[in-house]
Each structure stands twice: as structure tokens, then as C-alpha cells.
Image: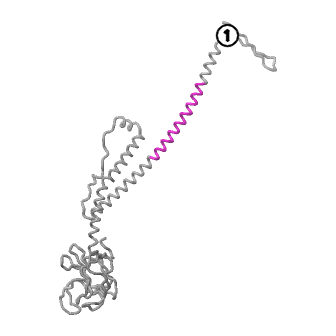
Amino acid sequence: MNFYKTTIHFQNSSKSMTLHMPAFLFKAWPVLRFFVAIGVLLFIVQVVSTTVYDGVLNHQLNERAKLDREMTQIQGTLDYLSNTTNSFFNDENRLYARFSLPMQDEASRELGTGGSISADSLLLRKTSPVFERMSILGETAQRIQGKLANNDASFRNLNKYMDQKMSAWRFVPSISPTNGRYASAFGPRIHPVTGEVGKMHQGVDIANERWTPIYASADGVVEVAQMSSTFGNFVTIDHGNSIKTRYGHMQLSIVHPGQFVHRYQVIGYMGNTGRSVGPHLHYEVWVHNAPVNPLAYMLPNGYTVD
């Protein structure tokens, strides 16, 4: 084997070192340098790849956390909508019960969101928790939307029914036609003027000061507005559905036959005209051509049916 002799002299010293190195090392140096360069390059590539991978991984983790927060917010919104719709449906049930209408079947509101799922989608849902959660959120939103859409027609019908009822109720007497003291009730009594015993009093008397306003107790058309020897200035209003109201002993009536009046509209003022012993309103309610107790058509505390 051939050797190369190499002498190494140390600076500022008389010492030196002699090395005997095999000749093949000098011949293999270009090859070793190539492998060293390849190793350095691979190391640099590994460092860069690791850095890029860590950056991408951190970005994906941040995006995943952001997506989780957004899905949590969506879930909270869907829960709120679900609770709101349940409360909404409870109010609907109360309205149906209030008007004695048959309530909807609860099962009809819980609409399904079924249908076939492709094998690829099923595999993705099983292998991806995020996709599975998004699918559940989508199905929940679709179910809530279906429940609301399914009840839209129901609410429209209920609203139409209520409008019809409200239109009819406008013509039903439900208030006291004036303010004052109830001086005489409905039923047999001793007539205060003639003294007749057992005379049927077909209405109620409400006493107050002269010129106290008198109101129509419901919508209707004035049928009579004239002077009578018995009731003085009196008015009859036809409310339809065989219901009429009569107002007597008024000081002055300010309506005329054929005039349409609304509930709470002033039709005259309290007085003492006709056969009367003091300022008061004689008020009657007739149903199917027969007098009934007007108190049955007066809601308490100023309430009305509309």
C-alpha cells in the first residue's frame, strides 16, 4: 500500500508532526465531498420540510378550532330556534284551544329528513368528525325549516278564522253604553211612575247627570231615532244576527236612521225625556225579537270582545 507523507509545522514553534496517510484517501476525496454535499442538501431539505409542515399543521389546527367555534355558534342558534319554535307552537295550541278548534297532531310537526346516503358520503361521515357534525347541523336546520313550513298553512287558516270571528264580534254588544249608577235591574218590578206591580222591566236603567255621553255598544246600523211618549228620545241599533239594542230617555240623539255606527261612537246624551223620574239611560238588548238581560252583554272592567 502506498502512503503519502505529510509534515505539519506549528506556527511560532519548533515542533512539527509527520503524518503518513494512505494514498486512496486522496483519490476518494471528490467522491466523499459529493456525498457530504448531498447530506448537507438533504439536511436543509428536511429542515425546510419540517418548518413548512409545522406551519401548515398549525394553520390547519387554527382553522379547525375556528370551524369548531363557528359550528358551536350555529348549534347554539339552532337550539335557540328550536326552543323558540316550541314556544311558538305552544302559543298556537292555546289559540286553537281558545277558539275550540282541533289542535294539530304533534307528530305531524316532527318532520323527518330521511333519504338514501351514498356510500362515499357515509364513509366520509364515519371517518370525518367535522363532516359528521356539519351533516347533523344541516339536518337539524332542515328539520326546523320543515316544521315552520309545515305550520305556515295552519297559521294562515287560524289567522283567517280569527279575522272572521273578529269581524263578527264587532257586531256583538259587549260594553256598558254609558257611565253611571245602575238604578233598576232587568225583570219584574214596581213601575216608578205608574206604580204598576210586577211590570216587566225589559232593560236596565243607568243613572247619571244630564248630558252624560251615551255610546253604541257594538257596530251596527241605526234603525230608529225618534221621539216617543214612553221612552222620549230613543234610538234602536240593528247589529245583525237578530241582535238589536235600544237606548231611551236621551236628552238628545245625534244619529239618524240608516247611519252606520261603531262601538264607542257617541249616539246621544243622557236626559229625562219621556216617562221618566230622573236623568238616566234605559238600555235594552233584544235577541231574536225577545228582550234579554243586558248585563249578559257587558264585559267587566271596560273590556270588549275585540
Q: Position of residue 207 (x, y in %)?
A: 30, 87
Name the spot of residue 278 as percent of width and height, x first.
Answer: 29, 91
Mark 1 element type: helix
Magenta run includes residue 54: yes
Does 33 sit above or below residue 193?
Answer: above
Residue 251 screen position, x and y as percent:
31, 88
Residue 28 location, quadrant? top right
Query: Could you tell whether 213 is left or right of 39 in the image?
Result: left
On screen, 287 above or below 129? below
Q: Quadrant of residue 181?
A: bottom left
Horizontal side, residue 215 vs residue 12: left or right:
left
Q: Is any atom of residue 220 visible in this view?
A: yes
Few, some or many residues within 10 Å of mark 1 (<14, 14–19, 20+)? few
Q: Which residues are magenta?
A: 41-70
Q: Which residue is mark 1?
A: 23
* Between 70 and 205, the one nearer to me in the picture: 205
Q: Residue at coordinates 33% horizontally, 78% vertically from top-left?
A: 265
With 171 as the anchor, is 38 left or right in this view? Answer: right
Query: Image quadrant for the N terminus?
Result: top right
Indicate the quadrant where residue 186 lies: bottom left
Q: Position of residue 34 (x, y in %)?
A: 62, 18
Above or below, 55 against 162 in this view is above
Q: Label 1 amino acid?
A: Ala
